[in-house]
Image: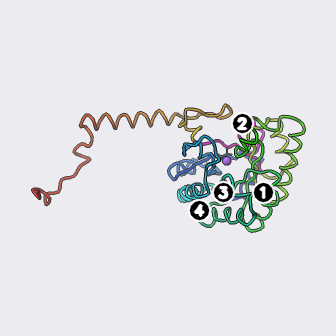
């Protein structure tokens, strides 16, 4: 069983693995493979809900899918991603929304896209018993503010700011930090500066762990970011199966004898 404690122990000894999942069958596969952490990411907006950003994703969508993932997971740590506007507006509401992920969806922890506004919130959540994974670098909920999904921390000032924010979140009690789309040499320095595990995506190899979006890994999307890698081609397999089904129904081959059942007692009822 992965806990926030075993994750800390693993950091620096062995690479930590993390993937997203948004449903029970996918979570069962990810968990069964021994991946350490399953993130029910708000990337579900793009990955499975058909939106073109993460902004429309609701608390209910993440809560419902976190429940599905948690029910199918035995060993991995399940982290629920807090969607846009579900935190950071009002403290009491933020605490309640985060707490519901543990109380109603059986998440083990929450992740917040972090910034100066989440330091005190992180401290408050941790005080209450809600473990927090921080997230710095590219924070996609800021896409409108950033004007796109560019690499972050690319100049000295931004890099210093990021390291300082990372320190503040560690000090506030975050158990881990996601670093998204930052230079590999900055991710290395953040990892050296912190004692909590860093988990990178598009952040090079010098973090304590890696995370990717499951639909990118499986090859379910026709697009994935350049820092990602497709490890399979599930879309092709889905297309094959769906076409085969259609063809067999149209040809009168499915259902065959073995897929249907005749009951003598209902003969000649009409
Ligand atoms: O929503 C998500 O999948 C994420 C990861 C990319 C870290 O936030
Ligand atoms: Na996210």
**Extent of the magenta region:** 197-214
Which residue does the image show at 33% across and 36% down from the upper left? 246
Whole-percent x, y for residue 260 in the image? 23, 49
Residue 212 occupies quadrant: top right
Q: Earlier in the sequence, mark 4 or mark 1?
A: 4
Q: Element under label 4?
A: loop
Q: Which residue ends up furthest to the left in the rendered image?
A: 268
Left or right of 7, for residue 269? left
Q: Earlier in the sequence, mark 3 or mark 1?
A: 3
Q: Earlier in the sequence, mark 1 or mark 2?
A: 2
What residue sits right under mark 4 in the picture?
105
What residue sits right under mark 3 in the picture?
2
Residue 190 occupies quadrant: top right
Q: Magenta includes 213? A: yes
Q: CA distance from mark 3 to mark 4?
A: 18 Å
Q: Residues within 10 Å of mark 3 (few under 14, many from 20)?
A: some
What residue sits right under mark 1 in the picture?
174
Q: Residues within 10 Å of mark 4 (few under 14, many from 20)?
A: many
Labels 2 & 4 near each other (Cβ < 8 A): no
Q: Element under label 3?
A: loop
């Amino acid at each position: 069983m992965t806990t926030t404690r075993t994750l800390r122990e693993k950091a620096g000894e062995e690479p930590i693995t993390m993937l997203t999942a948004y449903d029970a069958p996918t979570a069962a596969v990810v968990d069964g493979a021994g991946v350490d952490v399953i993130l029910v990411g708000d990337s579900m907006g793009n990955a499975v809900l058909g939106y073109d950003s993460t902004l429309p994703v609701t608390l209910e969508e993440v809560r419902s899918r976190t429940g599905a993932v948690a029910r199918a997971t035995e060993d991995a740590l399940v982290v629920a991603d807090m969607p846009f506007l579900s935190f950071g507006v009002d403290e009491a509401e933020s605490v309640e929304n985060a707490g519901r992920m543990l109380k109603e969806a059986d998440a083990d922890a929450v992740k917040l896209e972090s910034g100066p506004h989440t330091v005190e919130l992180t401290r408050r959540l941790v005080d209450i018993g809600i473990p927090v994974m921080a997230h710095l670098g590219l924070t996609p909920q800021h896409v409108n503010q950033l004007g796109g999904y560019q690499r972050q921390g690319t100049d000295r000032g931004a890099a210093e700011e990021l390291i300082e924010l990372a320190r503040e979140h560690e000090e506030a009690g975050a158990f881990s930090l996601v670093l998204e789309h930052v230079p590999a040499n900055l991710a290395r320095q953040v990892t050296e500066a912190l004692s909590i595990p860093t988990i990178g995506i598009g952040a090079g190899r010098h973090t304590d762990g890696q995370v990717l979006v499951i639909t990118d890994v499986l090859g379910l999307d026709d697009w994935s970011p350049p820092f990602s890698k497709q490890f399979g081609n599930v879309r092709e397999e889905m297309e094959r199966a769906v076409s085969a089904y259609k063809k067999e129904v149209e040809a009168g081959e499915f259902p065959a004898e073995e897929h249907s059942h005749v009951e003598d007692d209902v003969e000649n009822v009409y």
